[in-house]
Image (cartoon, rainbow, N blue to C red):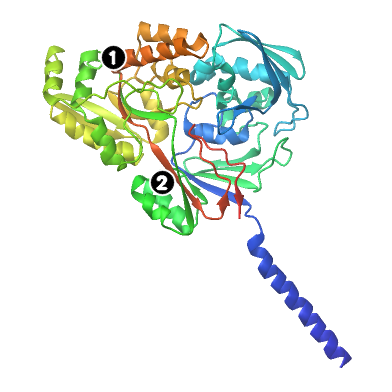
Amino acid sequence: MKGNSRTKATLLAVSAAVLLCLFAVPALAKDTLVVANIYDARTLDPIVQNEVATSRMCLHIYDTLLALDQENNLVPMLAEKWEQIDDVTYKFTLRKGVKFHNGEPFSAKDVKYTVERAQTPVGSAIRQYSEVVDKVEIVDDYTVIFRLKAPFTPFLMSLSHTWGSIVNQKAVEAGGESYGMNPVGTGPFKFKSWNKGDRIVLERNDDYWGKKPAYKELVMRAVAESINRTIELESGAVDIAYRVPVTDVRRVEENEKLTLYRHLENSTTYMGFNCAKAPWDNPKVRQAVRLALDNVGMQKAVFRGTGRAPNAPVAPSVKYSHKDIPYVKRDVEAAKKLLAEAGVQLPLKAEIWTNDYKPRRDLATIIQAQLKEVGIELEHKVLEWGAYLDGLQKKTHDMYILGWVASVPDAEFAISGVLRSTGGSNYSFFADAEVDALLEKGKSLPDGEERAAVYKKVQERIHELAPWVYMYNEETFHGSQKNVKGFVPSPRGYHLLTNVTFE
C-alpha cells in the first residue's frame, strides 16, 4: 500500500506538470517577428540611399537624435534635451550610458562624425538634409551645437529622418565599402545576417538604453509578388505583410485569423519624364503626354476606389499641400496638337520603366494603350528594385513610375529631394531656376501665410512645366496575424516594430 501511494503521488505530480506545460505553452511569447516586405533594402548604411526599404531597416538598427511620434511631435532619442539659441544655432544635450552594438560608448564625437560623413559624396542621396548644416561643434562629451548655413524652418523635424542615424566611426572605417552589409548602431536591434534578395535578420539588443522589444529576432523578408505576401500571411508563414494589394483587402478583412490596417501615406506616386533627354526636355511634349492620359480614371481602375488621384506633387496629408490646382482632363486632340507644335515626328517610340510592384505595372499597361492613341508607342520595361534605381541614375530612360514619401511631413521634403535641380532623388533630371529659388526661400521662412504662399507658387510652377504626371496618393493596406498587437503603420512609409507584442 505504501508503495502504491508513492506511485499514485508520482503519477499525479507528473500529470500536473504535463497539464501545466500544456496550458503554459500558448502563453509563451513568440521569439521571432517575421515581416513580408515588397523588396529588399539596397544597403543598411543610412546615407547611401534614400529609399523606404532601407529606412525600414535602419529605423531598427540605429537611433537618431530626435524622433516624431504619431502626432508629429518631436520626442527625445539620443538627445535628451534641445534648444534653439538663435535662427541658425541649436544646442543638444546627449543621453549618457549608451553603447553601440560593437561595445563602443556613444558620445558627441559620433554625432559630429555622422553629420560630416553625410556631407561627403557618400551621402549625395540625402544631401537635402545634411547640406543645411554649416558645422557641428563639440562642447563636451555629451553636448553638441549645430550651426546652420541659413535659417531652416523644418531642421529639428529633419533630424528624425534616418539620414540622422548616428553611426560609429570605428565600425564604419573597419567596414569600408562593405559597411552597408554589416551595420553598427545604438538601436534596439543588432544586425545578424542578410541573404540578399531574400531576408535580413536582426537580433534584439539586450543592452539597449530604451524600451527593449518583446521578441528576440526581427526577420524582414523580400516578397515582391503581392499575391504571395497575402498567401504567406494566410498560411501563418509571416506575422505582418506590408502592402496587401487592393484585390486582396476583403480576403484579409474577412479572415477571422487576421487583422487589416489601412492608412493614407505621405506619398505621391508619379510618372516622371527624363527632362534631360529629347523630346522630353520640351515642356510642350510633357504637357501633351499629360493631356493624353486620364490619371483620375487610371487611379480608380487600378485601386478600385481606394486612395485618391493627386492634383499636386505634395500629398494632401503633408504641410502646405496645394489642394486647389485643377485636375487635367484627358483631351486626345489637344495632345496631338501640342505634339505637332513641338515638332515631334510620329510614331514616337519610347520606353516606360517600372519596378515589379503590380499597381505600377498595371498603370504602365494603361499608359501604353492611351499614348498609342496619340502616336507614342511605349515598350514597358520591368526591372528588379536595385537595378531600377541604378538604371534611373544613368539618364538613359524616357519615362518611369516611382513614388516619393515625405518622411518628414513638410512640403520642403516632399519637393526638394525630387524636383530641385540638385535633389538627390531627382530622377527626372528636372531643373528650373524659379523652382530652385522658391524652394530656397520657402525653407527659411517661419511657418505661416508667407511660407504657405511660397509652396503654393512652387507647386503651380511645377504643374505648369509638367516634369511629372501624378498617378496616385495610395491608401495603403497591411495585414497581420490576430495575435499581433502594437503594430501602428506610419504615414511616413517606414513602420516602427519595436512595440509589437504577441498575444
* Residue in view at x 67 percent, y 16 percent: 112
Q: Is residue 166 visible?
A: no
Callout 1 crowding tier (Cα within 10 Å): few <14, some 14–19, many ≥20: some
Where in the figure is residue 206, as x and y percent of width and height? 72, 42
The residues bearing labels 1 and 2 have C-alpha atoms spaced at a distance of 34 Å
Circle 2 residue = 244
Left or right: 289 in relation to 213: left
* Quadrant in which the C terminus appears: bottom right
Query: What is the secondary structure assignment of the residue under circle 2?
Result: loop
Query: What is the secondary structure assignment of the residue under circle 1?
Result: helix
* Depicted 220 relative to depicted 296: above or below: below
Q: Quadrant of residue 93?
A: top right
Q: Which numbered circle lies on residue 375?
A: none
Circle 1 residue = 465
Left or right: 105 in relation to 43: right
Left or right: 184 in relation to 40: right
Q: Nearer the viewer, residue 121 or 317?
A: 317
Where in the figure is residue 166, as x and y percent of width and height? 64, 25
Q: Nearer the viewer, residue 97 or 318?
A: 318
Disc 1 and disc 2 in contact, CB within 8 angstroms? no
Where in the figure is residue 117, as x and y percent of width and height? 60, 17
